[in-house]
Image (cartoon, rainbow, N blue to C red):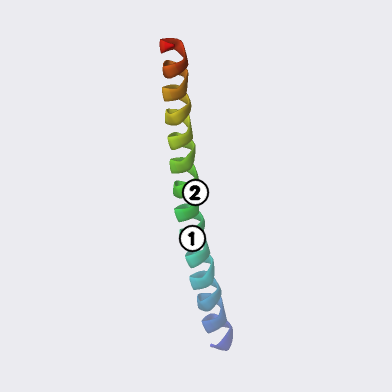
Amino acid sequence: MEGEGSMQAMNTIIRNNIKLLARNRYKFFYAIVLLKLRYQKLKEYINFL
């Protein structure tokens, strides 16, 4: 019974870590998209000049 409880605790911790990782990955992806958009705007601006 004791081992069962610790297994469940481990699973909960792992699940929480996965949620955190996923959230950070979305932030990272969002940052990359913003950078790409900025770079594209910059290129258009340079071409305009």
Residue at image x 41%, y 24%? Answer: 41
Q: Is residue 2 left or right of residue 31?
A: right
- Residue nearest the viewer, comparing 37 with 7: 37
- Residue nearest the viewer, comparing 30 with 39: 39
- Residue 35 is tagged as none
Of the residues shown, which amino acid type is indicated by label 1? Answer: Leu
Residue farthest right in this picture: 3
Q: Is residue 6 left or right of residue 29?
A: right
Residue at image x 47%, y 15%? Answer: 46
Q: Answer above or below: position of 40 versus 49.
A: below
Residue farthest bottom in this picture: 2
| Inter-mark Cα distance, 1 to 2 | 9 Å
Q: Secondary structure at mark 1?
A: helix
- Residue nearest the viewer, comparing 27 with 5: 27
- Residue 20 is tagged as 1
Residue at image x 42%, y 18%? Answer: 45
| Position of residue 11 measured from the top left corner of the image (x, y, whole percent) | 52, 70
| Position of residue 36 measured from the top left corner of the image (x, y, whole percent) | 47, 30
- Residue 25 is tagged as 2
| Position of residue 13 measured from the top left corner of the image (x, y, whole percent) | 52, 71
| Position of residue 31 measured from the top left corner of the image (x, y, whole percent) | 47, 42
Quadrant for the C terminus, please: top left
Residue at image x 48%, y 66%? Answer: 16
Q: Answer above or below: position of 45 versus 27.
A: above
Q: Secondary structure at mark 2?
A: helix
Which of the two discs, 1 and 2, labels the residue nearer the N terminus? Answer: 1
Q: Is residue 44 left or right of residue 13?
A: left
Of the residues shown, which amino acid type is indicated by label 2? Answer: Arg
State the count of labels. 2
Q: Answer above or below: position of 40 versus 22.
A: above
Q: Residues within 10 Å of mark 2 (few under 14, many from 20)?
A: few
